[in-house]
Amino acid sequence: MKRCAMVLLACAALAGLVSGLAVAAIPVKVASSVGTSEQNYVNVTYGKLVELAQKYSGGAFEFQLYPDMRLGDEQKTVRALQHGDIQMSVLATNNFMPFAPSCGWLNMPYLFGSLEEFRKLVDLMWDQHNAWAVKESGARVLAIVDIGYRQLTTDAAHPVRNLADARGLAVRTPQNALAVSAFNALGFKPHPASFADTYGMLAKGTVNGQEGCFNNVVTMKFADHQKYATCINYAVHSANIIVNEEWLQGLPEQARDALIRAGREAMAYERTKVSQMLVADDRALQEQGMELLGVVEDLSEWTRLGRTSWLKCYDVLGYGNADKGKAIMAVVLSKKEALANAWEDWLRQPPATR
């Protein structure tokens, strides 16, 4: 009887061990380029993604976040993800593009007439965009999140209200050929550098200003060394949450599907928060001592000049093959045209049937 009891206890212990192994959490090492401020738009998205991924997977994951570029700058973390050292990275679209050039269409200067148009194109291009991302970088995009346009901030000596004010101004841009080409076309002196170096460049006076969303200006404390905020609306500021595709496909089906679903739903959730975040960012900039100059006086000329850089951009999108770059943009522009036509058809309908 005693022997039987011992056997039962041993079996129970073994069953518990096996059960524990079966439900062991899947570690997800996550690199982020920003701090943990709840005001930051990528944190809004990432937080919701974690919440939903755990909900849909039954708590299958153990997310380990490394904020403030603790694992290196944005491009370094993509390389780490490709090598399997981390599983997920949260970074600006322009710093993902060098690894997935075709995905650079999101950064084309003066392509989007509104944030709404950007979002509709993202949704229409989703499958194609991810096909390019996986093929070229080995990473899948779980979410593409936006926070208005990429704008301009400058120091106290250089307010920018028009193109004449911008001529020759030293501005930090991402290490992205599309941004560099656009700012050259607009008459600036672009200084491409890592996002991690931006605050230091502003503090030292290496550059007079920087381009990017106002949300980053607030949450990354750029206002310490910037006085003026100018709206130039040259590209939508977006970020990506990406995962290693090989790792993703190796997950149990429920966990994999949960992560993909959570990414799309977190993206949709963030969109509902953007308008109020933009208002809050403007208010925060003023509270931090910055002056909002509004939209440049000659925006149409900025748009015309900015689009002259598209010829150089084709070569970048095509990874050295301009014809391939043109073909990529042809796909995007056809979707853009379809959106415009659908909108016009809707406007022609009687108000009662809309």
Image: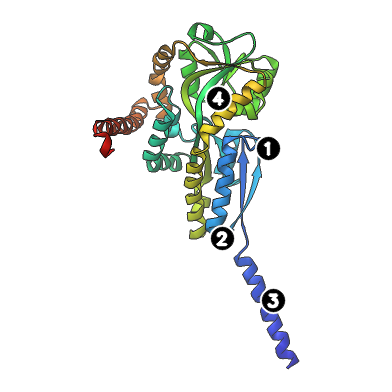
The mark that comes first in sequence, 2 or 1, is 2
Give amino acid for label 1.
Answer: Arg
> Which quarter of the figure has residue 340?
top left
Give amino acid for label 3.
Answer: Ala
Q: Residue at x 58, y 58 (%)?
A: 60
Residue at the spot of label 4: 212
Residue at the spot of label 2: 58
Are circles 3 and 2 on residues that touch, CB within 8 Å? no
Residue at the spot of label 1: 70
Residue 142 placed where, x, y %?
Answer: 49, 44
* 182, 50: nearer the viewer: 50
Residue 14 placed where, x, y %?
Answer: 67, 76
> Which quarter of the figure has residue 91?
top right
Secondary structure of the residue carrying numbered label 1: loop
- Crowd class of label 2 (few under 14; some 14 to 19; many from 20; radius 10 Å): few
Residue 173 placed where, x, y %?
Answer: 55, 21
Distance Cα–Cα, label 3 vs label 2: 24 Å
Residue at the spot of label 3: 13
Distance Cα–Cα, label 4 vs label 3: 57 Å
Secondary structure of the residue carrying numbered label 4: strand
> Which quarter of the figure has residue 46?
top right
Give amino acid for label 4.
Answer: Gly
The mark that comes first in sequence, 4 or 3, is 3
In which quadrant of the rendered image does the C terminus lie? top left
Distance Cα–Cα, label 2 vs label 4: 37 Å
The numbered disc on residue 106 is: none
Q: Is residue 29 above or below residue 149?
A: below
Give amino acid for label 2.
Answer: Gly
Are circles 2 and 4 on residues that touch, CB within 8 Å? no
